[in-house]
Image: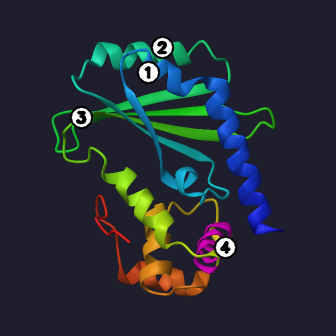
Amino acid sequence: MDILDLARRNQQKARKIIEDTKIIPIWESIGARVNLVGSLSTGLLMKHLDIDFHIYTSQFSLCDSFQAMVKFTENKSFMKMEHKNLLDTEEACVEWHAWYRDADNALWQIDMIHILEGSRYDGYFEKFAERLSAVLTDETRYAILKLKYDTPESEKIMGIEYYKAVIRDGIRSYEDFMEWRSLHPVTGIMDWMP
């Protein structure tokens, strides 16, 4: 399996899904600013099929947030949707998770995090993606993609764990990565920046 080719193909599919679902114009229709974040934005999407957006509005209206999501229900490729209201936490957001079945019958998770502008995490993950992209080399990009490829489907690992292990600590093998994870357990949001 050519890992770089698989990553490239999955990233192309993800961009086609974004276009086909009209995610950006739907959120913009309620006055939101929409930013692609996560592994797709850095070119590190591998086989965990997910697409991440952070969506910002200057005022938060649950009604508007639900209004945007209702528009997605018109697309029969969306199989399931759920939300988590975190407005009363420091995250000041509503997490929307939607599952989309593509033309090849693969199931994609699309995370749309609707965040109040000016709150703690406004722009944080965009800055992370920018910094990560700036320090990636061909060798570290391949190492991250290979670790992601070697991860069993049943294992749930945050992208930042791969990035920190490879870039900061020089991890290159899956076995070393598993040992690294046991020494660096994750609790909540990791605040490491490359």
Q: Name the residue tied to disc 2.
A: 70
Crowd tier of the residue under label 4, counting other residues whose Cα lies within 10 Å: few below 14, some 14–19, many 20 or above:
some
Q: CA distance from mark 2 to mark 4?
A: 38 Å
In this view, which residue lies farthest toward the right?
Answer: 1
Q: Is residue 64 above or below residue 131?
A: above
Q: Amino acid at mark 3?
A: Glu
**Image quadrant of residue 43?**
bottom right
Q: Residue furthest front?
A: 134
Which mark sits nearer the N-terminus, 3 or 4?
Answer: 3
Answer with left or right where residue 74 lies relative to residue 3.
left
The span from disc 2 to disc 1 (Cα, nearest Å) is: 14 Å
Report the residue marked by disc 3: 117
Identify which residue is drawn at 61% across, 72% down. 141
SS state under label 2 = helix
Question: Which residue is pictured at 42% across the width and 75% down the height?
Answer: 164
Label at residue 146: 4
Q: Is residue 142 magenta?
A: yes
Mark 2 or 4, nearer chain start = 2
Depth check, mark 2 against mark 1: the one in front is 1
Q: Nearer the viewer, mark 1 or mark 4?
A: 1
Q: Is residue 167 left or right of residue 101?
A: left
Q: What's the amino acid at mark 2?
A: Val
x, y percent for residue 26: 50, 19
**Bounds of the magenta segment:** 139-149
